[in-house]
Amino acid sequence: MPVQSPIEISNRAIEHIDDVDPLEYHGHWEPVGVARVQNTGTSAMVTFSKRKQQPYIIGGALDTNKYVFEQLHFHWSDSDESGCEHTLEGMKYSMEAHAVHYNAKYKDFTEAKNKPDGLAVVAFFIQACGEKDCPEFKKITEGIRIVQKISTSASLDSDSFTCRQIAYRGLVCRS
């Protein structure tokens, strides 16, 4: 049975696999198409459209399976100390982003979501940078401000979601 939120991630409890290639991101950071941000009532969700091909991930524990990007959503709170769902070594971060992908062997997300190998979710822990306006997140936070009411949405340039804005140093980003 899969583990559900919240999860306490502990280095002592993780099985380290040394001979696995890094997770590869393809097309996630290309500034093409339209990014749509929507207030779902529980998070801000981002989807991409008007692209020749949706972004996808391969490698890592996914091996050669291709997982197609479906959406990115954020979890945060009023406090910079407790915004994410999960904890890492007991620490809560300001925000957590989940990049949700579905296995390309299925027709779409709806078909894949109930399959044991159907989804791959990559979580990013994000810590407030201490500045009032963190430049790396300015476009993202401006988009989220537009959709403060539940069920509202807005279109943003895809360049609002670049590797530097979402990812951390050392992440493998390939286009």
Image (cartoon, helix red, strand yellow):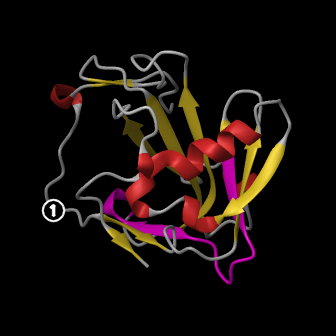
Question: In the displayed structure, would residue 36 be above or below residue 104?
Answer: above
For residue 48, side relative to residue 164 (left or right)? right
Of residues 28 and 9, the one nearer the viewer is 28
**Residue type marked 1:** Asp
* One can see residue 23 in this view: yes
Q: Nearer the viewer, residue 82 or 123?
A: 82
Please state the horizontal and vertical placement of residue 53, each as a whole percent of the image. 64, 80
Q: Which residue is mark 1?
A: 19
Question: Which residue is pictured at 38% across the width and 31% down the height?
Answer: 128
Q: Which residue is outermost to the front? A: 132
Residue at the image position 53 percent from the left and 69 percent from the top = 56
Magenta-highlighted residues: 45-62
Q: Is residue 147 left or right of residue 96?
A: right
Question: From the image, which quarter does the C terminus lie in?
Answer: bottom left
Q: Residue at 62% of width from left, 77% of height from top?
A: 32
Vertical arrangement, residue 71 with respect to residue 58, above or below: above
Q: Nearer the viewer, residue 97 or 128?
A: 128
Q: Is residue 114 visible?
A: no
Q: Secondary structure at mark 1?
A: loop
Q: Position of residue 52 (x, y in %)?
A: 68, 84
- Point out residue 88 in the picture as x, y percentages from the top left corner: 29, 26
Q: Is the residue 19 above or below the residue 90 in the image?
A: below
